[in-house]
Image (spheres, grey):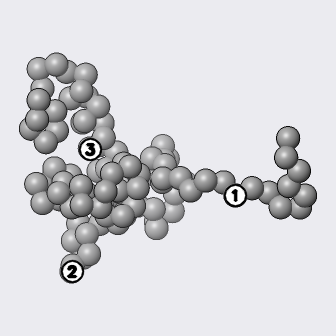
C-alpha cells in the first residue's frame, strides 16, 4: 500500500448524483446547467442541446440561459430505462 504521508490522494471528479431527498441538496442543486446535465448523463453538451431543441427533456430558460430541474433529468432517465425494457417502444431518438 503506498505511503501518502500527510497527503491523501484526490478523489476522482464525479458526476452529480441523483439525490433521493431534495431537502438534502440545497437550492443550488435544484436547477442544473447544460454542462451539469451532460456530466451527470455522461454525454456531450451538444447532445443535451439536441434534447432541448427536440423538446425531449423539460427545461427553463432564463434569458439565454437554459436550466433543468434535477427531477426532470431523473424522470428523463427513468423514461429511457422504461423504454429500454419495453420491446415494443422505439428507443429515444427514433432509431431502432
Most distant residue in the bottom direction: 63
Sequence order check, earlier mark of 2 and 1: 1
- Check disc 2 and report its element: helix, strand or loop: loop
- Check disc 1 and report its element: helix, strand or loop: loop
**Residue 33 location, x and y as percent?**
35, 66
Q: Is residue 30 above or below residue 22?
A: below
Pick the front one: 33 or 94: 94
Callout 2 crowding tier (Cα within 10 Å): few <14, some 14–19, many ≥20: few
**On the rendered structure, is 28 left or right of 81?**
right
Count of numbered labels shown in the rendering = 3
For the residues marked 3 and 1, what is the alpha-carbon distance in whole angstroms? Answer: 32 Å
Identify the disc placed on residue 63: 2
Q: Are marks 3 and 1 in contact (CB under 8 Å)?
A: no
Residue under label 1, please give it: 10
Pick the front one: 46 or 73: 46
Residue under label 3, please give it: 76
**On the rendered structure, is 15 left or right of 6?**
left
**Residue 39 location, x and y as percent?**
40, 55
Identify the disc placed on residue 22: none
Callout 1 crowding tier (Cα within 10 Å): few <14, some 14–19, many ≥20: few
Q: Identify the residue shown where x is 52% and y is 57%.
A: 25
Q: Is residue 40 above or below residue 7?
A: above
- Check disc 3 and report its element: helix, strand or loop: helix
Amino acid at each position: 500500500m503506498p505511503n501518502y504521508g500527510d497527503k491523501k490522494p484526490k478523489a476522482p471528479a464525479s458526476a452529480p448524483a441523483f439525490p433521493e431527498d431534495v431537502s438534502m441538496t440545497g437550492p443550488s442543486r435544484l436547477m442544473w446547467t447544460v454542462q451539469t446535465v451532460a456530466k451527470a448523463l455522461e454525454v456531450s453538451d451538444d447532445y443535451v442541446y439536441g434534447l432541448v431543441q427536440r423538446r425531449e427533456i423539460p427545461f427553463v430558460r432564463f434569458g439565454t440561459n437554459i436550466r433543468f430541474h434535477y427531477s426532470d433529468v431523473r424522470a428523463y432517465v427513468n423514461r429511457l430505462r422504461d423504454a429500454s425494457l419495453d420491446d415494443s417502444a422505439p428507443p429515444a431518438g427514433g432509431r431502432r
